[in-house]
Image (spheres, rainbow, N blue to C red):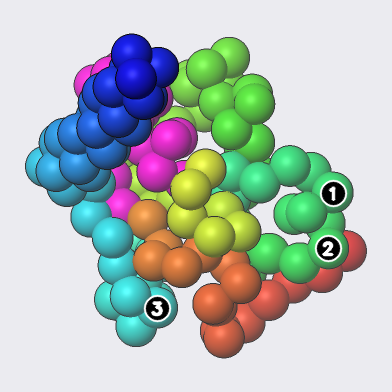
């Protein structure tokens, strides 16, 4: 019985944490549809946070590859005074990248809703 109560409390805490994180993230990260993303990414810093092998298999035309795993050591490559447009394969890594950038003082953060797998625009492959 004690195990069941502890398990229920643990699951409830996890759900509450997820909900709070979701609403907090909405304050600093804008999730854009593909059309909204296309309207603004040419005037912004377009960053693909996937790993290099994923990037080389295909990426949005004009994107720079700064993998999430290298983001903290490559922050100097991203300007704080310009909008940042992020994307990954599905949207999970780009939202994590946005959290890192937000903690470092970046303001105008946007990411592609659904990620690269939902992208129908121009793609470049190597």
Local SS, label 3: helix
Local crowd at mark 3 within 10 Å, few (<14), some, or many (≥20)? some
Q: Is residue 95 magenta?
A: yes
Residue occupying image coordinates x 64% and y 26% = 69
Residue 43 as seen in the image, left or right of residue 59: left
Residue occupying image coordinates x 40% and y 17% = 3
Q: Which residue is mark 2?
A: 57
Q: Going by the picture, which residue comes out furthest to the front?
A: 1
Residue occupying image coordinates x 82% and y 69% = 125
Q: Nearer the viewer, residue 114 or 107?
A: 114
Q: Which residue is mark 1?
A: 53
Q: Earlier in the sequence, mark 3 or mark 1?
A: 3
Residue 50 as seen in the image, left or right of residue 17: right
Residue 34 as seen in the image, left or right of residue 14: right
What numbered label is drawn on residue 101?
Answer: none
Are circles 3 and 2 on residues that touch, CB within 8 Å? no
Alpha carbons under labels 3 and 2: distance apart: 20 Å
Residue 121 point in image, percent of width and height: 56, 84
Q: Earlier in the sequence, mark 3 or mark 2?
A: 3
Alpha carbons under labels 3 and 1: distance apart: 23 Å
User: Magenta residues, as a range?
Assistant: 94-110
Are circles 1 and 2 on residues that touch, CB within 8 Å? yes
Q: Which residue is mark 3?
A: 34
Is 10 drawn above or below residue 118 in the view shown? above
Q: Nearer the viewer, residue 20 or 74?
A: 20
């Amino acid at each position: 019985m004690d195990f069941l109560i502890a398990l229920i409390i643990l699951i409830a805490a996890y759900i509450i944490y997820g909900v709070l994180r979701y609403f907090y993230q909405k304050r600093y990260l804008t999730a854009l549809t593909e059309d909204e993303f296309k309207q603004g990414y040419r005037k912004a810093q377009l960053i693909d946070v996937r790993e290099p092998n994923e990037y080389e298999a295909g990426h949005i035309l004009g994107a720079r590859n700064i993998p999430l795993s290298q983001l903290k050591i490559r922050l100097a490559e991203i300007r704080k005074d310009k909008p940042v447009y992020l994307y990954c394969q599905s949207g999970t890594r780009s939202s994590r990248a946005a959290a890192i950038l937000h903690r470092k003082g970046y303001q105008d953060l946007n990411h592609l809703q659904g990620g690269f797998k939902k992208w129908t625009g121009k793609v470049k492959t190597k």
